[in-house]
Amino acid sequence: MLEINDLVKTYPDGQQALRGCSLTVPAAEVVAIIGPSGAGKSTFIRCINRLVTPTGGSIRLDGEELTTHRERRLRETRRQIGMIFQEFNLIERLTVMENVLAGRLGSVGFLQAFLRRFPAQDVERAFELLERVGLGGYENSRADALSGGQRQRVGIARALMQEPRLLLVDEPTSSLDPKVARSIMALICELAGERRIPALINIHDVGLALGFAQRVVGLNAGSVVFDGPPSAVDEAVLTRIYGADDWRDAFRQEGEEDRHLGSREAVS
Ligand SMILES: Nc1ncnc2c1ncn2[C@@H]1O[C@H](COP(=O)(O)OP(=O)(O)OP(=O)(O)O)[C@@H](O)[C@H]1O
Ligand SMILES: [Mg+2]
């Protein structure tokens, strides 16, 4: 279980990115975090694995306070938190298999890793994961030869290779076309569900958030302004999160308002 209480982040320049956010995520829940650009979504998930140092508040994972961890404990905790990014963060010149095994770098010894001698069971697990994310047969392809969707599948396999206790996902679909974006969001949610890993997913696409997450958290200007199931997200809620003009534009631009709302009804 992830318990976040009164999380505050003020950047050194005085920017108040988080103004006291609280959120409790039981095991295995997939939570979509939505909100306008600058609302604090990335800051929120980065505080959890301390890519950003919180100014105040508490973050507990299975009862363990994370905000006070230093050095070795911090590295250990990071190893247990899988991170999936918008820009994939693959090592371009390495193969798909090497990128996935990189998820184990924190756990195998440095020399072993340097020599790229991973335990046989790790290699076997990497093969299984690649199969699961739809990349069976791509083990030896170089990362830079893959499409965006395939690259994100590698990113997902690498995160799961860590056997994480928590998945943090920041805009996993922003650079993908709508169809691929949908399949990537579906895959992340399926894997989190089947492995019972709680997941926080920052996502700009409201349709995907409503269609795939079990719970939606709306951030606006550093505060949680909505927290509930997708079925409770209506126009008033979206207005609270995005402001009236903003969210309507977002739907209309894509001309997919009906499909978005429809996909939500189909799932909930
Ligand atoms: N390193 C930083 N230094 C100063 N201010 C920052 C820093 N990172 C983010 N901010 C500010 O904090 C606020 C929240 O930013 P954050 O990136 O968390 O928003 P976001 O919801 O992820 O936005 P987006 O949807 O554009 O990714 C913004 O006002 C942003 O300008
Ligand atoms: Mg962001």
Image (tube, grey):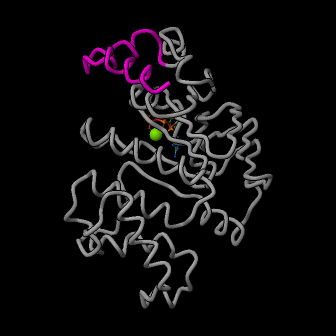
Tell me what residue is drawn at x 71 percent, y 37 percent.
24
Q: Residue 209: name its quadrant.
A: top left
Q: Residue 140: name its quadrant.
A: bottom left
Where is residue 113 shown, x and y percent of the image? 47, 85
Tell me what residue is drawn at x 51 percent, y 76 percent.
105
**Vertical order, 147 against 238 (above or below):** below
Where is residue 229 shown, x and y percent of the image? 58, 24
Q: Looking at the picture, tell me which residue is in the foreground, 164 or 175.
A: 164
Where is residue 225 shown, x and y percent of the image? 62, 21
Residue 204 sits inside the magenta stretch: no
Q: Looking at the picture, tell me which residue is in the foreground, 156 or 35.
A: 156
Relative horizontal placement of residue 76, taking residue 140 as reference (left or right): right
Relative horizontal placement of residue 251, taking residue 210 as reference (left or right): left
Where is residue 150 shown, x and y percent of the image? 28, 56
Relative horizontal placement of residue 259, taking residue 128 as reference (left or right): left
**Vertical order, 102 against 233 (above or below):** below
Q: Main secondary structure of the magenta part?
A: helix
The residue segment tinted magenta is: 242-268
How many marks are shown on the rendered structure? 0
Q: Looking at the picture, tell me which residue is in the foreground, 65 or 265.
A: 265
Tell me what residue is drawn at x 45 percent, y 27 percent.
267
Residue 249 sits inside the magenta stretch: yes
**Vertical order, 20 against 50 (above or below):** above
